[in-house]
Amino acid sequence: MKTKILLDEEEMPKRWYNVAADLLTPLDPPLHPQTGEPLKPEDLEMIFPKGLIRQEMSTERWIDIPDEVREILRLWRPTPLFRAHRLEEHLKTPARIYYKYEGVSPAGSHKPNTAVPQAYYNMKEGVERIATETGAGQWGSALSMATCLFDIQCRVYMVRASFDQKPYRKSIMQVWGAECVASPSELTNAGRMILKDHPHTGGSLGIAISEAVEDAATHENTNYALGSVLNHVLLHQTVEGLELQKQMAMVEDYPDVIYGCVGGGSNFPGMVFPYVPEKLKEKKEIRMVACEPSACPTLTKGLFTYDFGDTARLTPLLKMYTLGHDFIPPSIHAGGLRYHGDAPLLCNLVHDRVIEAQSFHQNEVFKAAVTFARTEGILPAPEASHALKPAIDDAIACKKTGEEKTIVISLSGHGHFDLSSYDAYFAGNLVDYEYPEELVKQSLANVPKF
């Protein structure tokens, strides 16, 4: 019985899959932040290259991956699918557990899957500099690597809480030639306004996005790049699920359930979206479960409505599950999952009950991560560990029922830069936040009305 299910480089996908072609309910259009009217492609040209704007607006089912992009993806793709034999044995479960491991990329996560094409399309249009935000630092690291490979300057606004918790993320960004600053910062009007009212804030992805968008909009040679949420980001990530389908076929198995962590939504949709038409059209019985933190319960407690993607209300309005654009979550150690909204494509499928959502506390998540590390040997990122918790629970339930279920985990990255988080867990210093309903209601009161 194989432990590693490997594809040859030539079997890497040549096209991205666009789930917008197969939705039950058409996606609601993004709206202009000033007029409230549906966004036109030209409205985005100030901060995005035309190649990405076309992908953002596209409903074509398949979109070709440029050869130059595939050539760089070959550095680590296809990524391995592992059968978790040792975890199964430890749990004494009849379930078959697999995990698709994206931590083998140079940046240590799934994020380069979209960072490379985003840098490529900007390079093709002569963009000299890119501004972006990052939560835990995985996206900032990935884009720093990608811009380095395409000779583009890069500035990363990193959420202050993670900037302090994970100093070596800044170090690796600098190795790849990028500038990393803590957000909120004194470099933008958005940052200065937040610091005036909240001088000791740990920041949020919404604030960091405001700073990066303002940076791009106020520098003629600069574009903006986002590592999650947007349609073209999720499109690029489908290389994961397309590879997974081939790998599962190699071992003549099929997922009963796929678990993946969700913050803004890129890794999990990348893994499950290629299975959506199989569930809807071929009536395959497959569950797809989005796993989020209880401290930032966007899909499980948020409102499905139009909202801004950032705190300063600079971005287009997106129809999504949201906790409110001025929501600032507690400084949990899964910094990449601290976002008030979620990808519209993912939210659409959750709303239509094609995809499920569950939330978990950070102590139970770290407990699952330690169990995984002590059996499989891989130290998972705190974000990715949100998928491990329900997967392990599911496997334990199978021990009681005798069900030989096939469980697949999207292991989106390693935790080598998150050791301070593990230190806090072992010291008993992690607090389980259950975000109060009344505070969620207060934040949602400021969502724009349509």
Image: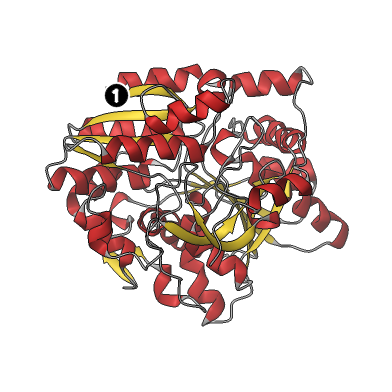
Secondary structure at numbered mark 1:
loop
Badge 1 crowding class, 10 Å Cα cut-off, few under 14, some 14 to 19, many 20 or more, is some
Q: Residue at x 47, y 45 (%)?
A: 310
| Residue 327, picture quadrant | top right
Mark 1 residue type = Trp
Please, is residue 286 above or below residue 206 in the view? below
Please, is residue 269 above or below residue 58 in the view? above
29 or 3, nearer to the observer = 29
Q: How many marks?
A: 1
| Residue 375, picture quadrant | top right
Give coordinates of residue 104: x percent, y percent. Answer: 43, 36
The colouring scheme, among rainbow, by chain, secondary structure or one colour, is: secondary structure
Q: Residue at x 26, y 63 (%)?
A: 41
Give coordinates of residue 130: x percent, y percent. Answer: 26, 36
Give coordinates of residue 137: x percent, y percent. Answer: 46, 30
Please, is residue 277 above or below residue 142 in the view? below
As drawn, is 395 to the left or to the right of 35?
A: right
On the question of residue 271 being in view, the answer is yes
333 or 298, nearer to the observer = 298
As drawn, is 181 to the left or to the right of 10?
A: right
174 or 27, nearer to the observer = 27
Q: Residue at x 51, y 75 (%)?
A: 278
As drawn, is 224 to the left or to the right of 249?
A: left
On the question of residue 107 being in view, the answer is no
Give coordinates of residue 299: x percent, y percent. Answer: 64, 56
Please, is residue 349 above or below residue 74 in the view? below
Residue annotated with mark 1: 176
The extreme right residue here reads 400
293 or 281, nearer to the observer = 293
As drawn, is 195 to the left or to the right of 405?
A: left
